[in-house]
Amino acid sequence: NAGVTQTPKFRVLKTGQSMTLLCAQDMNHEYMYWYRQDPGMGLRLIHYSVGEGTTAKGEVPDGYNVSRLKKQNFLLGLESAAPSQTSVYFCASRDQSARQETQYFGPGTRLLVL
Amino acid sequence: GNSVTQMEGPVTLSEEAFLTINCTYTATGYPSLFWYVQYPGEGLQLLLKATKADDKGSNKGFEATYRKETTSFHLEKGSVQVSDSAVYFCALSERDRGSTLGRLYFGRGTQLTVWP
């Protein structure tokens, strides 16, 4: 039981390049989230998904796209990376039950955009 | 709207000192409250939580009590250890009018460093 995994762990991009961050969870969770963490800002929600085939915008969605083709995977895409997207990205998942509110986080992906 | 405010760090303490990290919140509904901890180079882990007023969450010697009257959820530990050095995040999850989305709203995090 690996929990929530993220790939890659670290990446350097040039401005304008594209990339996809992969999040995978093996807990059969319905809900998945992508956050970014910036110094002094806490975590901010980028996009989220309440089930396979569904996605929605969070607090800071601009410049990102997501897809949830399989229940266990949640992909975050940057079509044209900008230096402002330099950040640490965390994926999280949780059960859909109202009683099971705990979100489980992956180890993060550090992205540097030059 | 929903928001969380926690004391700014960094907080530096000697081993066995008493720790308090203040957290207050605003919410339009009836939130659950959480403390998450992030150790260096790792993702966030749930430390403790409380789901209703006057509940006390506790784990690993840490405690926090859900105070509705003061909209607070302060984190405390009686005797910190070097291994407690980490960033601590206060968060709320609102049970939004029947929705079970459970989006988390985070504070900015408080860096704790404990010296031997």
Image: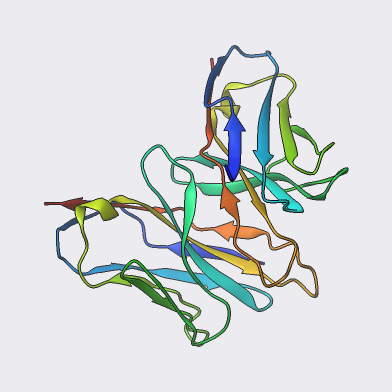
Q: Residue at x 63, y 21 (%)?
A: A82
Decide: is A83 above or below B37: above
Decide: is B33 above or below A16: below
Scheme of colours in the image: rainbow
Across and down, in percent, residue B92 comes to: 58, 66
Q: Residue at x 54, y 19 (%)?
A: A11
In which image quadrant can residue A60 be found? top right
- How many marks the image carries: the answer is 0
Q: Residue at x 46, y 76 (%)?
A: B72
Q: Is residue A101 visible?
A: yes
Q: Residue at x 73, y 27 (%)?
A: A77
Q: Is residue A62 visible?
A: no
Q: Give the left or right position of residue A33, taking residue A66 as reference.
A: left
Across and down, in percent, residue A21 comes to: 66, 28
- Compare residues A46 and B83 and report the one nearer the observer: B83
Across and down, in percent, residue A25 comes to: 66, 43
Decide: is A63 above or below A40: above
In which image quadrant can residue A97 be found? bottom right
Quadrant showing the N terminus of chain B = bottom right
Q: Give the left or right position of residue A1, taking residue B45 as reference.
A: right
Q: Give the left or right position of residue B2, taking residue A43 as reference.
A: right
Across and down, in percent, residue B34 comes to: 51, 66
In which image quadrant can residue B84 be found? bottom left
Decide: is A10 above or below A65: above
Outermost residue toward the front in this view: A1
- Compare residues A60 and A88 and report the one nearer the observer: A88
Q: Give the left or right position of residue B29, taking residue A41 as reference.
A: right
